[in-house]
Amino acid sequence: MKKILSLICLLMGATTLFAQQLPDVSVENLDGKIVSLRSLVNGKPMIISYWSIACKPCIQELNAINDALEDWRKEADFTVVAVSTDDARLKAAAKNMATSRGWEFTCLFDDKQTLRRAMNVTQTPQAFVVDAEGNIVYSHTGYSPGSEEELFDKILELKKKK
């Protein structure tokens, strides 16, 4: 049992040593312009959250992030990006939802699923924390109230490393 636990710890450590770089995939923003995800890396850490209109936990997580954002930004300078995984038929509804919710972050629309595949997102909600150089340093899937704090804790850890 000790050997198995040691191997698991070793493997988990290896994933943090070899951080994956954000893919250079372009998707549509709220204004209908095509932007590269990597172009959003601007020397600041980033939270990227994948969502869909039919995913209640996704909406809860994004609302919780939005509610905490003003206070969080007093402690750290970072960006939040919400990526809709809804297909072309539902893209207009996703844009309407993002606008009506008043989310104060960048919203992208991956209706062709290219970014989702490039980042190996298999279910929503899935969130990533990216460092200032565009390396993915943390990921979690699912949402329960308060788990948005984990994302912010990772942002604060990145701030301490500077």
Image (tube, rainbow, N blue to C red):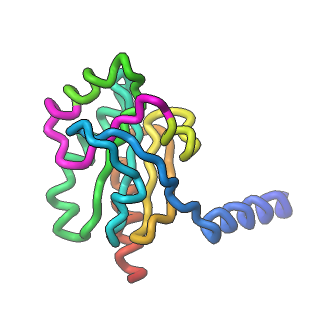
Hey, which residue is sitting farthest front in the picture? 34
Residue extending farthest bottom:
162
Front residue (pair 160, 45): 45
Query: Does the magenta run of residues contain 122?
Result: no
Above-or-below relation of 40 to 43: above
Q: Nearer the viewer, residue 17 or 87?
A: 87
Would residue 101 be counted in the magenta stretch? Answer: yes
The residue lying at 28 percent from left, 59 percent from top is 79
Identify the residue at horizontal 32%, vertical 41% (top origin).
Answer: 108
User: Residue shown at 51%/54% (left/top)?
Assistant: 23
Determine the residue positioned at 51% across, 37% down: 114
> Which residue occupies the extreme top position in the image?
89
In the image, 84 versus 113, the foreground residue is: 113
Quick check: can you spot residue 25? yes
Number of marks present in the image shown: 0
Residue 6, how many percent across, how many down? 78, 65
**Span colored in magenta:** 98-113
Q: Quadrant of the C terminus?
A: bottom left
Please identify the quarter of the rendering in which residue 32 is found. Answer: top left
Q: Position of residue 54 (x, y in %)?
A: 37, 21
Q: Please give left or right for residue 30 compared with residue 83 in the image.
A: left
Horizontal and vertical percent position of residue 24: 48, 54
Whether residue 145 is visible, yes or no, is no
The quadrant of the picture occupied by the N terminus is: bottom right
Would you place residue 58 above or below residue 138 in this image?
above
